[in-house]
Image (cartoon, rainbow, N blue to C red):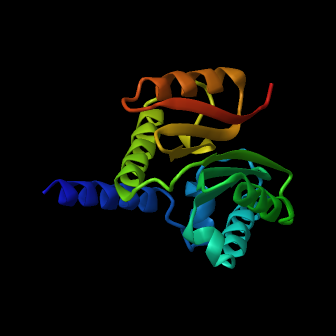
């Protein structure tokens, strides 16, 4: 029964994320309902390209992938690496692969040397990410702030916050995130505008 509950929570989290980021095909509609983002459309496309290229390059190395759990998230040319790898040599190999991907300006290494986390922990991470995103939707005190400007990534209970924000926005986002249960640590990967 507990397994079924976790499975339902994971599916719900994935559906929430999918609904939030569903693309709109009509170009006139997409411009009027597009998520606010302080990145240009070209940079957004570049970030997606970085993530896709990194995952493809890593997938080509089956030995590396079979013993690791690696996530790559890009925001404004910064590649955030999270997950678990078996040793320092594998970690160095992953970093070397990602550093040479076109458009990567900087790599933030948050890989840890450990056994890959299990599916229950991954489901908890997905739920925590959805929880933080929902909490950010409740911020109404900041002028010109939209929670879509913040990318939330969770790995083993550690919440990473990415985005181009003012210091005031960053502080509010950190404080709202801090109030969420089960957050072990918050790591900001913000690019401050002021």
Question: How many labels were placed on the picture?
Answer: 0
Q: Quadrant of residue 87?
A: bottom right
Residue shown at the point (83%, 57%) measured from the top left:
104
Task: Give the answer, above or below, for where 88 lies relative to 184.
Answer: below
Residue 75 picture location, percent across and down: 71, 50
Q: Quadrant of residue 171?
A: top right
* Closer-to-camera residue (12/93): 93
Q: Is residue 101 visible?
A: yes
* Closer-to-camera residue (97/6): 97
Q: Is residue 179 left or right of residue 153?
A: left
Q: Residue furthest left?
A: 1
Residue 21 picture location, percent across and down: 51, 59
Quadrant for the N terminus in the image: bottom left
Residue 110 picture location, percent across and down: 66, 44
* Closer-to-camera residue (42/185): 185
Residue 190 picture location, percent across and down: 71, 35
Quadrant for the C terminus in the image: top right
Residue shown at the point (68%, 70%) measured from the top left:
58
Task: Give the answer, above or below, for where 107 lies relative to 169.
Answer: below
Residue shown at the point (73%, 71%) measured from the top left:
53
Q: Is residue 140 visible?
A: no
Q: Is residue 22 left or right of residue 53?
A: left
* Closer-to-camera residue (130/117): 117
Residue shown at the point (39%, 40%) measured from the top left:
131
């Amino acid at each position: 029964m507990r397994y079924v509950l976790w499975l339902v929570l994971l599916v719900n989290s994935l559906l929430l994320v999918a609904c939030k980021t569903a693309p709109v095909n009509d170009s006139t509609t997409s411009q009027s309902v597009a998520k606010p983002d302080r990145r240009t459309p070209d940079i957004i496309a570049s970030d997606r390209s970085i993530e896709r290229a990194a995952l493809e390059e890593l997938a080509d190395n089956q030995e590396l992938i079979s013993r690791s759990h690696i996530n790559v998230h890009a925001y404004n040319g910064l590649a955030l690496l999270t997950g678990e790898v078996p040793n320092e040599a594998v970690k160095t190999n992953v970093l070397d692969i990602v550093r040479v991907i076109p458009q990567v300006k900087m790599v933030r290494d948050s890989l840890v040397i450990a056994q890959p986390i299990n599916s229950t922990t991954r489901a908890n991470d997905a739920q925590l990410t959805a929880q933080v995103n929902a909490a950010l939707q409740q911020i109404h005190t900041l002028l010109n702030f939209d929670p879509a400007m913040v990318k939330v990534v969770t790995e083993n209970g550690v919440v990473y916050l990415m985005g181009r924000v003012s210091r005031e926005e960053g502080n509010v986002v950190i404080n709202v995130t801090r109030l969420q249960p089960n957050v072990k640590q918050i790591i900001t990967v913000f690019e401050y505008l002021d």
